[in-house]
Amino acid sequence: MRVGLVVPCYIDVFYPEVGIAALELLERLGVEVDYPFDQTCCGQPMANSGCEADSRATEEHFIGLFSRFEYIVIPSGSCTHHVRNKFIAAPPGPERDQVSKHVYDLIEFLHDVLKVNEFPWSEFPHKVALHNSCSAVRGLHMASMSERVHDPYFNKPKALLEKVKGIELVDFPRHDECCGFGGTFSATEEAVSARMGYDKLGFIQRSQPEYIVSSDMSCLMHLQGCGRRLGTEVKFRHIAQLLNGDHA
Amino acid sequence: MGIREDILDRVRRNQPAAIPHPDLRDFTHLASADLITTFARSLGVMAGVLIDKPPDDLGAFLREKFPDAKNICSAVPEYVGTSKPEDYPVWADAAKIDVSVVRSPLGVAETGSVLLSDDDLRVNTIAFLAHDIVILLAPDKIVENIHVAYQHPAFKEKAYSVLMSGPSGSADIGGKEVHPAQAVMTLTVILWPESAKTS
Amino acid sequence: MSVHPVVDQASNAARFLADRSREEYFDTLMWSLREARDRSASEVPEWEQLRDLGSAIKEHTLSHLADYLEQFEASAKRNGVEVHWAHDAHEHNQIVAEILSRHGAKQLIKSKSMLTEECDMRRYLENRGVTVTETDLGERIQQLDDEPPAHIVGPAWQKSPEDVARVFAKAYGSDPNNAAPVYLAHEMRVHTRALIEKADAGMTGANFAVAETGTVVTATNEGNADLSGNVPRLRICSVGIEKIVPTHRDLAVFIRLLSRSAVGMPITQYTSHFRAPRRDGEMHIILVDNGRSERLGMEKFWQSLKCIRCGACMNTCPVYRRSGGLSYGSTYMGPIGIIMMPTFDIRRFSELPFSSTLNGSCSNVCPVKINIHEQIYAWREVMDEKHQIKLAKKSAMVAAGEVLSHPELYRIVTAAGETTLKRLPRFAIYNDFNAWGKHRETPLPAGQTFHEWYKANRRKA
Ligand code: SF4
């Protein structure tokens, strides 16, 4: 099984360890991983800002690099959501469709494609709060949505984390309310964005976790920025790091 | 082109390609025995009061429940009040009423609503300007939900009809419902079969 | 062309947020309505089917709107109602003024209507010597305080009970220190009752208009539409042309959805059906377009006309809850405001589509399944196409598009090293570090990018 790994730009620059964890984890699971060296970004920043035309060349570049893969895996719900559901800046065609149809968030790939049952190398004896991004929940349906009160409950990232030895997962109020990152929004509407981040941290910290874990590093980048400003102790990890066996 | 024709013309030009009407359902689930308990619960949610059988003496009941009431306007043959709707040809004057007594032809279990239309009220304002309202409702006139309720002919025939569900209230200050708002202070439903005794 | 300045929702929101206790009060209140909505939806097993039906009925009706409008008009006329048509706010206001002056009516009582807000009718009539009294408690509070509604269901929700106590103390001489909602509602009752009883004309909006019977339907908790529509002999109903539903059986679906979505109650206390004038009275219906027919022709946006004004999208919106309703500077606010207001004035409301994180909760609660967050996204594109994006943001995006489509350039600007933070491309958090850093620490670039690590450790020669 050959997988094309996408390492989103903000992970590339700020959180290379997350890219490394995703790569190593896939390899441990016996997947042959290809990291196309010329990759840059999926085009989401421009498209989310309304500047679809400006994301066109970037999306075309992405398609050029990834359309040959049977599975394209991204350790980021928002990038996956963009490539799967909002990839319209590049002209339509079989290659664009191929990319949109074969893209997976890392969690989906582990949970739905590989159907991983255990991560024997993993152990994380800590209290952990799981934050699922809106892209993951409402865009990719990786968990049931709080608004859909009649839907059966499920939570794929949580189901995977529960396989990590020693982990203690804690709940918190308004669990799938947006954290306030929102891409461009975090800068154009910085006051509201930060308030949402502070509130999210406030709700999470009611259950006093040591770590906040997510499959979306962009939410965590924002929450970490808020947390550092507030002087909070809580630490942040990408879910790939726990599944890959980080102990702290 | 007149305004009417122009608007209709713009709408016709701009409306999307025809989309079919979906099939409607009534979503009824309850056995008829459960209708009354459901009605009672819903009316409670809406802050209404339910009396589950006719009192022996409605006059005594009203005096006890509304000791300060001087003007009781009855629109029902079961009870002769101190006034009747026709005494208020100027509809604003219904504000002088302390308690209105009316009969509803339809109750809705799902929402605790009762239907009142201009034929039941004769002067519509007796249902809002009065201080309190007492509504007689035959238990066999309770239907399960709004889907069934809207099949009642009143909605096609009467000039005015209202589904009243509890006393007037407002959540406009602080988001929590408080009673009363501008219309009746309390709403009481008495389950009272149509041909039962009069007092 | 618009004469109004562009609404700067972000700055307005920042001002609202500066008062932490007010913001917290509002957020908590709005969230409690969202929770109430969840509880009440969970009690209805067919909830999702009702949403599907609500959406489908509205889509059907809007796609046959001209026919249904004609049917509605014919039914209303048969009932003895006088039907008027208005292109826009001005025509609507003129018609109302003309009906009132025909009857020498100077005292108008009205129930809440977002349409008359849209038309700024109160001011128009007051300039012509008509006294207008809002009989909805929340709307009356806003009227007395000379402020537009902050929420389409509870216009005064942005005010605390203490604020309302102050407004009433000034207007009614009530106790400024008694902020108990029961007391305040009672003050309202005492002071508006007199105005209601002596009014010459009453006005309502419409939550729905039933084509088969020509009926105007209102949903209120206070009974104030019933008072406004019944106490005076003259009744005027303003109806947006998108309010039509075919039959009462269709109406049932929406009545079941409306109040549950809005405030988590099974129904409003008064669901009222005005089909014909009272025997000794007169009834007028004004059918108002005001931009709706144009929106109907917008491929990506016509679905916003399905809206039944329940406000659920606002209650759930994390941005609305922390911005306050007035920050949108518009008649409709929150998610539904974002997608409707640009159709009224694209320049003035060009920034609104950016006041969203696109989290999608609004679309999930919407009882008629409007794809609100997708429309917000689509509006952003329109703003770009129509050159309504701020220059600074636009140039940043052009530059980002340049860098991100050229791997060599991308490597240069992302290369780890001393100058990284300075040169760090804005796309990395999509924008401007100065704004980001006001309330947050900026992320620290790693010593080595993933790319560099891969090159050093994994890349086969
Ligand atoms: S858009 Fe939907 S949720 Fe929002 S007010 Fe309209 S009907 Fe309600």
Image (cartoon, coloured by chain):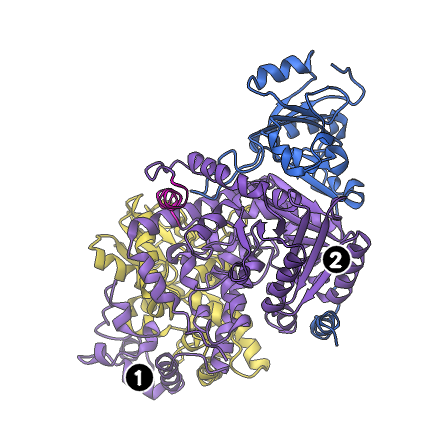
Question: Where is residue C253 shown, x and y percent of the image?
Answer: 68, 48
Magenta: main secondary structure equals helix
Question: Where is residue A65 shown, x and y percent of the image?
Answer: 46, 82
Question: Where is residue B64 shown, x and y percent of the image?
Answer: 58, 14
* Residue C168 drawn in magenta: yes
Q: Which residues are magenta?
A: C159-173
Would you place residue C11 above or below residue C225 in this image? below
Tell me, by letter, which chain the rendering colours blue: B
Please report whichever mark, 1 or 2, sits nearer to the chain's N-terminal start.
2
Q: Secondary structure at mark 2?
A: strand
Q: Colour of chain A?
A: yellow
**Label 2 near ligand 1 (CB < 8 Å):** no
Question: Measuring 62% from the left and 73% from the top, which residue is drawn there?
Answer: C298
Q: Secondary structure at mark 1?
A: helix
Examine the image and state in which quarter residue B119 appears. top right
> Neighbour class for label 1 at 10 Å: few (<14), some, many (≥20)?
some
Residue A242 in view: no
* Separation of marks 1 and 2 at Cα, in angstroms: 71 Å
Q: Is residue C354 left or right of residue A90?
A: left
Give the residue at mark 1: C411
Give the residue at mark 2: C82
Question: Where is residue C403 shown, x and y percent of the image?
Answer: 36, 85
Q: Amino acid at mark 1?
A: Arg
Q: Amino acid at mark 2?
A: Glu
Q: Chain of mark 2?
A: C
Tell me, by letter, which chain the rendering colours purple: C
> Neighbour class for label 2 at 10 Å: few (<14), some, many (≥20)?
some
Quarter of the figure with the N terminus of chain B: bottom right
Q: Chain of mark 1?
A: C
